[in-house]
Amino acid sequence: MSAATPEARSSTDVVLIGGGVMSATLGTFLNTLQPDWTIDMFERLDDVAQESSNAWNNAGTGHSALCELNYTSEKADGSIDISKAVNVNEQFQVSRQFWSFLVKTGQISDPRDFITPIPHMSFVWGNANVDFLRRRYEALKDHPLFSGMRYSEDTEQLKQWMPLVMKDRVRGQKLAATWIASGSDVNFGALTHLLFGALKTKPGIALHTGHEVADIRRIPDGRWEIKVKTLSTGQNRTITTRFVFIGAGGAALPLLQKTGIPESRGVGGFPVSGQFMRCKNPEVIASHRAKVYGKASVGAPPMSVPHLDTRMINGQASLLFGPYAGFSTRFLKKGSLFDLPFSIRGNNIGAIMAVARSNWALTKYLIQQVMQSNTDRMRALRDFVPDARDEDWELIVAGQRVQVIKADPKKGGVLQFGTEVISSADGSVAALLGASPGASTAAPIMLTVLKKCFPTQLPGWEEKLKEIIPSYGMKLADNPDFCAKIHKETTDALQLES
């Protein structure tokens, strides 16, 4: 995608900042619901999907809580709380419906260009963990959103499900796994390119890559004035708009702060970088086809659940293990080392300091991760691949994640592991902050933006929204028959296994 400006207009209905899957999803929604609106999209880099949406920079799991054990916590009485898993899966079903609509309407010609059926598995060892997984399975197996999940402690069955994981494993070890066929691998970088590619063909829509948003300020008539710099020439220009969405990954926080809206006060960010071991041996890659998730170590943040992950990138199978956490003061992979210090304000420093004081376990974990040697990383990998050889694997750096810090009247500040939409009272500006489950739930997150920012238009959009998202306004978890119907329809449309 060229860095040239398709259309240099001075006023537009909507400005989308950031060339990732979030802006692409919101732009697609708005263009479908209100095709007469003009939309200008700005991306700092020379192509879209180069930061968190890039296939090598995110987990690509299609987070649906089928295998991620951090979404099912154990209560004090020993029961398993599945409420978060149900909520995450429900959100992913919305994304599946949205993508299915795009396929059915010809905006995406081949779903295999971005989504591939891959079984999802949870894998544990040790008596306590096996007992936990068994109870988790019992809590989920009859739920309509988790239909088809299987559980086994049988060695021969586990060998069929994950031969690479079971090869040369020590005999007598207590093992268990769940397996479900309805999992998927999603290349969000490819999806982002498909969405922007379709949007660029629509009248009134312009994508500007190589353009950095330098400032955002409210003007007297209530609209927003966006100052944009063309990086190739250094030229500055301004564009006014009625609505701004800031979906610029880690850069969303400093841009939100530039708006000066009261809702941005007390909000900070804590960056965490990620690393993966990537397999270089085609024979090893071919011997594994699943996403196998384990349990996070004590003190590890939720997004650091270890997993052995089959990925489909540019039509080729790849195999990753991780993530290994790291720390950088950058908010973007291609950001500045001054991103974190420059984000500290008088109104959020109290919350940031409070979080620093109360999250010693996370700090200790990050220090341990940063200090790891390749021997340490390979030792963790061998918990999943017992015969892993050093020469078959290489370390790659993934994307930056900026966790949300918010002021709290009791604690001073809290660190949030999730995604959050922060919008102005009048709905004229919204920003997306946070990380996992992130891209997998882009569609339901953008529905939240529509509800928060376009309450006047929403009643007129409802019929179309129900065409895009047939379950709009209801919970599939509460409607088993409709849940099964929607699951089959999206499975067929996206060419996924039943």
Image (cartoon, helix red, strand yellow):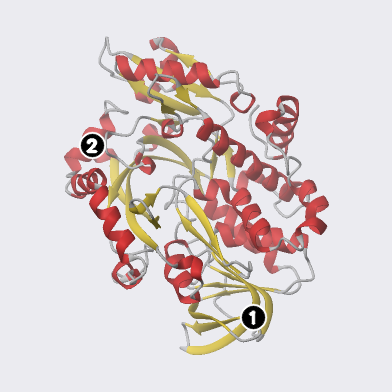
* Relative image position of residue 133 (x, y in whole percent): 41, 20
Left or right of 230 in this view: 467: right
Query: Residue 187: in sight, yes or no?
Result: no
Q: Is residue 306 above or below residue 484?
A: below
Element assignment for label 2: helix
Pick the residue in front: 308 or 283.
Answer: 308
For residue 378, which numbered disc appears in the image? 2
* Relative image position of residue 47 (x, y in whole percent): 52, 68
- The answer to which image quadrant residue 378 occupies is top left
* Residue depicted at x 48% and y 75%: 260
For residue 222, which numbered disc appears in the image? 1
Left or right of 164 in this view: 53: right
- The answer to which image quadrant residue 148 occupies is top right
Pick the residue in front: 118 or 58.
Answer: 58
* Relative image position of residue 171 (x, y in whole percent): 26, 11
* Residue depicted at x 35% and y 36%: 306
Pick the residue in front: 472 or 193.
Answer: 472
Left or right of 260 in this view: 441: right
Label 1 sits on what residue type? Gly
Q: CA distance from mark 1 to mark 2?
A: 56 Å
For residue 455, which numbered disc appears in the image? none
Left or right of 58 in this view: 363: left
Element assignment for label 1: loop
* Residue depicted at x 63% and y 45%: 95
Q: Quadrant of the C terminus?
A: top right
Query: Residue 398: in sight, yes or no?
Result: yes
> In front: mark 1 or mark 2?
1
